[in-house]
Amino acid sequence: MSLVSMSVMALTFRYNLRQAGNGVSDFPFILTILLGHVIFSHTLLFTLALYSQDQIHLSEVEIGLILLLSIGAAGTSVWMAGSPDALKFRRFSGYCTSAMVIGLTIAAPLMAHPQLPVSVDWIAVGASALAVIFINGTLHRTLLSRRNKTLALLSIGLMIASVIVAQYVISLNMHFELTELALLNHGGKNAFWLEVFLLMTGVLGVGLGAVMGNNPRQHWRRFAATAILVSLASITVFTANDLSLRYSNTHFELARLVESLNGNRSALYVKYLQYEAGEDGTMRQSVPSDVFRNLETYYAAASRIDRLMGQNNVQDAIESFYHEDIHHEGHEHAAVTLADEIDRFYQFMKSEFGLQVSPVEISDVDQIMFERRLNEFSNLIIATARGASESQELIRDMALLGGFLIVLFLAMGVFLPAHRSTIQALDALEAEKARIYKLALCAEHTTKGIVLTNGRGQITWCNDAFCDMTGFRFSELEGYTLLQKVRNPKANQREIRKVFESIRNAKPVEIEVLSQRKDESDFWMSGSITPVVENGRLSKVVHVLNDVTEEREMRDNLVKAQAEAERLALVVRHASDGIALLDANMELDWMNPSLEKMTGYSFDEIKKHSLHELLRGIETNAEDVADMLSTVRLREPFSGEFLAYRKDGSEYWIEAILSPFFDEAGVFTGYIVVHRDISERKTLELALISNRDELAARVEERTQTIMNQSLELEKALASERELNRMQTEFVSMASHEFRTPLTIIDGVARRLDKRADKFTPDDVREKAQTLRATVKRMTMLVERTLDASRLSSGRIKLTPETFKLRELINEVCARQREVASAHTIDVDVSDYPEELFGDARLMDNVFTNVISNAVKYSGENKHVSVLGTTEGHYAVLRVRDSGIGIPKEELPKIFQRFFRASTSTGIPGTGIGLNLVKSLVDMHHGKVELDSVKGEWTEFTIRLPLQSPLETGVMMSELDEEDGELGGAGIEAATGTGG
């Protein structure tokens, strides 16, 4: 059994160790214990097999020490073979393991014997140990570490065989000769106990190795193996205990009966001697009364012994001793058994005391031999009974040890893996619940409409966004199909049939179709439709839809603009005038074919040189060229007439028009150059010099008309581009700004509608305050947008008057606290002027913009400080946050219209607030300064004159000088060059 246990556990250990070494599992503690058990079992097994079992005894301490050394050897081997920290020792793991096994092979017999060996051939022992260490280490390194299972089995067999041979050689060269005194003083567990112990641990080890695995769904195998082991152990212990008890009780009863028989025999013999000494030759002597009691007790004990000897649970040696013939040397009687002697003594006593007629003779020698025989019989029975007691002690030890090992097996092989898998399952369940909650949260709060239908297309669920999109309540949609509720007769029916075909084929499909709301208004609906197939059948369909009416209109406008741009490009490409584009470095970027035809130069030739250098000749007016170049350096438009020269040297007159163009940020990007061949016109001028005035007027008129048309065309193109860009950006940003308050208003209104009967007056007032705050926020957004529009068109009206400046700051901060209750706004305006002359409404807009920006971009810090002071002739307000900050390179652009810092990505905003702030402060003859460190802080400083020119109409020299210094500082801060 132990050999089978060793083989199974060795293979199991090898597989799981490879998994641990490859990072598939943790360090194999259980497998390390199994390997230690293999080494322990192997050591004890061959110690019992190769040495005399009568001389082998191991105490509990020695057994525990061998077990700990075996587990230590196994742990060292596992660490060297599988740990990433021991890679440099891995190739030596086989040699180390073999050395430790051989060391235990030598140490175990020394522990098992009470005396050291009388002679040891250390040369043979050392040679065999070194040989097996070398062989096993080489096999481990070359064969066992590979993935080939056949080679692994072969290497294990060879390694076991080499260890067995080495143990046999060591046992032949270690001779033990023990004295009787040493054997008597040598305590501990005997060989039989160790054999039973190995058998039990082998069964448990095989069971643990067989059920070892990392699959948490296979814990039932461990429970089944545990139940079988418990059942086998219980049946074995109960059966062995019952047999041992009956065996022990029978022999103890026999011992008691033999002692009783011997005692009565002695008493009767003494009575017989007394009776014989008092005999007077007559038959009238009386027999003592206790003789009859002793005879009766003697007979009962003899009868009971006969019955017990006829049972099967009496040891064969005792039964043979009782029934075998007795030969007394020099005795004249035939051989008799002990049973016969017992009966014969009983008959002798009866005859001597006159209780039977037939005489029976027993000599004194026979009496002595009979007494000795009874004593030997009693000693044999007592020794056997003591052996039975030792068997019961062994059963008790094995029961306790088996229970401990089964508990260990349950803890290490069942409960701990089950606990780990349960924790993992609970963690997975919590993660799944969190995922489902997040999905539900996203579905409820997304702006896209989500609809879930069954396999027949009936709506089973939709989110609020879809209800808002279509105007239906969920109760009006449930049980109906989408076509029944939102189908538009003007929709593309072919597109709808295509969607149905994809759903029937269980394929996802994208859709964009004209739909109809509950109020019969048209809207464009776009999104994706995803069928869900379960068990081979279409069970659900998920629709993710969005209202793209505005996007559709913008797309149509973009298509129209692109078509217009293509037409303009066609006009430019086929125009008779030569047209070229110069980049910011005044290098040629593009030219139309007319310019190449007009000059005779190719694109590459002009690109290598400047255009004016190639076309200028001897007769070209140098002053006109210088004027053109100076105008170009100033990035201003220019037009003029020049005498130019073609590539072939021929002269021709051109009218050159140079128009600069700038990008959205106002940065110069190049020039549009238009060359018109006016040679014919110049010839006519010379030919019709007599009619110069009339012709000049007509030519000038025509030239002006053409120039105006060209300029108008250029302005129309620039205006169209700017309009499209501004419309796209503003609509995108403003829609984000307005959607949040509208969502809040809608949510509060719906809750009031659904739970009106449950709200208390305080709840209604709270909801009303929320609505008012949200409406106030929308009003501010609208006012800000209108002010920006009025400012850009020059229609903003300034109404100055004396207003409460400090009170206005406190009111703005209070409004921000209502909107952003999670933020902390520290206000200190004790040194700020009480009153100021200016437009209170516009200054409210300024302060609201700056403070709301500080709140919006404060990040996770959520702390804003507002400090109002008086510095010289200025009222200074500093608003500082500890938020996301602004990169230094973007500070000069921050006050440009529609510009937003790169750090504001993902935060709603329109990009017009700070432009409006700067313009309104400039209208009040003040200054706005900005300083910021990206990722740390941002500080806005607003300086307003205490004596406003709007009130006095006169600029004082002191204020002019101080205003100039502060203005310079503001410019440095805005451009990022200040401190």
Image: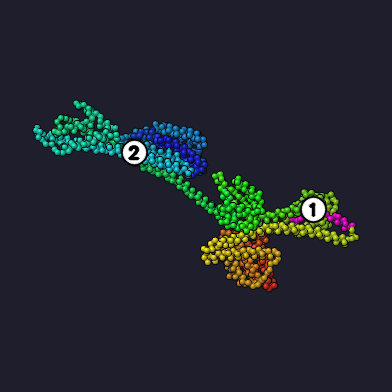
Dot 2, how many residues are within 10 Å of its Cα: few (below 14), some (14-19), or many (20+)? some
**Residue 180 position in % (x across, y down):** 31, 35
Vertical placement of residue 60 versus 439, above or below: above
Question: What color scheme is it?
Answer: rainbow
Kindly identify the amino acid type of the residue bearing the numbered disc 1: Ala
**Residue 248 position in % (x across, y down):** 29, 38
Given residues 958 and 378, the one toward you in this image is 378
Vertical placement of residue 380 versus 541, above or below: above
What segment carries the magenta color? 670-687
Where disc 1 sits, the SS reads loop
| Residue 549 makes an appearance in the image | yes
Q: CA distance from mark 2 to mark 1?
A: 116 Å
Number of the label disc, if any, that sits on residue 240:
2
- For disc 1, the marked residue is 575
Quadrant of the rendered structure where residue 183 is?
top left
Give the quadrant of the C terminus.
Answer: bottom right
